[in-house]
Amino acid sequence: AQKITQTQPGMFVQEKEAVTLDCTYDTSDQSYGLFWYKQPSSGEMIFLIYQGSYDEQNATEGRYSLNFQKARKSANLVISASQLGDSAMYFCAMRPQFGNEKLTFGTGTRLTIIP
Amino acid sequence: NAGVTQTPKFRILKIGQSMTLQCTQDMNHNYMYWYRQDPGMGLKLIYYSVGAGITDKGEVPNGYNVSRSTTEDFPLRLELAAPSQTSVYFCASSPTRDRVREKLFFGSGTQLSVL
């Protein structure tokens, strides 16, 4: 079974600063995918970034990057130059390559950007 | 392109009532999912389907039923609603080209209150 842990229930960050959202995971699978989703106050789930367990490079998507440390089983999301529109809930999730189709989510981190 | 469409957006039920949450996707995705999100929590998988005629239980299936008669539709049925089913329900879909990498496309959610 997979488990995702997000230890930061809430974070406050000054606008234009970089922020790191923590995510650790537990799995016995060798091949898996890691995802980050953003949920603004409007409620929709927005895909941000993906990292495969065998990808050699850390994933980047614009201002988002994923600091993947496989040995530590961590997949932290880094947002550079934060903006007011980044205020939202952020969820880390993972899916194994084999066995089942389940995408397991963490409990989320509420990020608030301060002007 | 509509993507994943959920109806209704809001609903209030009395204890013991039944209802069906509708979900339709127009992306020809084989995989579809129902998640629930309780306040301050991550998403938990209720049921999922890997294709028409095939469904399986997720983490929290009790009190729910699903069917998948077509690729497009994946309705979620609540029988004998209970206050514990007060939650936000998300339908999602994903393609199957590369199972582990494919992100989920989410509907906008249904806010359900059982009083």
Image: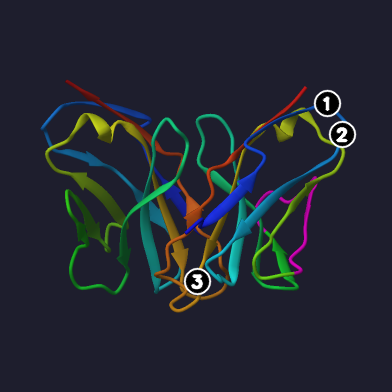
Quadrant in the picture for the N terminus of chain A: bottom right
The location of residue A32, given as percent across then percent down, is: 40, 69
Q: Nearer the viewer, residue B20 or B84?
A: B20
Q: In this rendering, do the residues under marks 1 and 2 share a single chain?
A: yes
Q: Nearer the viewer, residue B109 or B1?
A: B1
The residue singled out by tag 3 in the image is B95
* Segment tinted magenta in the rendering: B58-69
Is residue B15 within the magenta segment? no
Give me the C-alpha separation between circle 1 and circle 2: 6 Å
Is residue B67 within the magenta segment? yes
The residue singled out by tag 2 in the image is B17
Give me the C-alpha separation between circle 3 and circle 2: 34 Å
| Label drawn at residue B14 | 1
User: Which mark sits nearer the N-terminus, 3 or 2?
Assistant: 2
Residue A54 shown left or right of residue B107 in the figure: left
Name which residue lies at 82% across and 35% down: B81
Q: Callout 2, which amino acid?
A: Gln
The location of residue B112, given as percent across then percent down, is: 68, 32
How many residues crowd mark 3 within 10 Å: few (<14), some (14–19), many (20+)? Answer: some
Mark 1 and mark 2 residues within 8 Å of each other at the beta carbon? yes
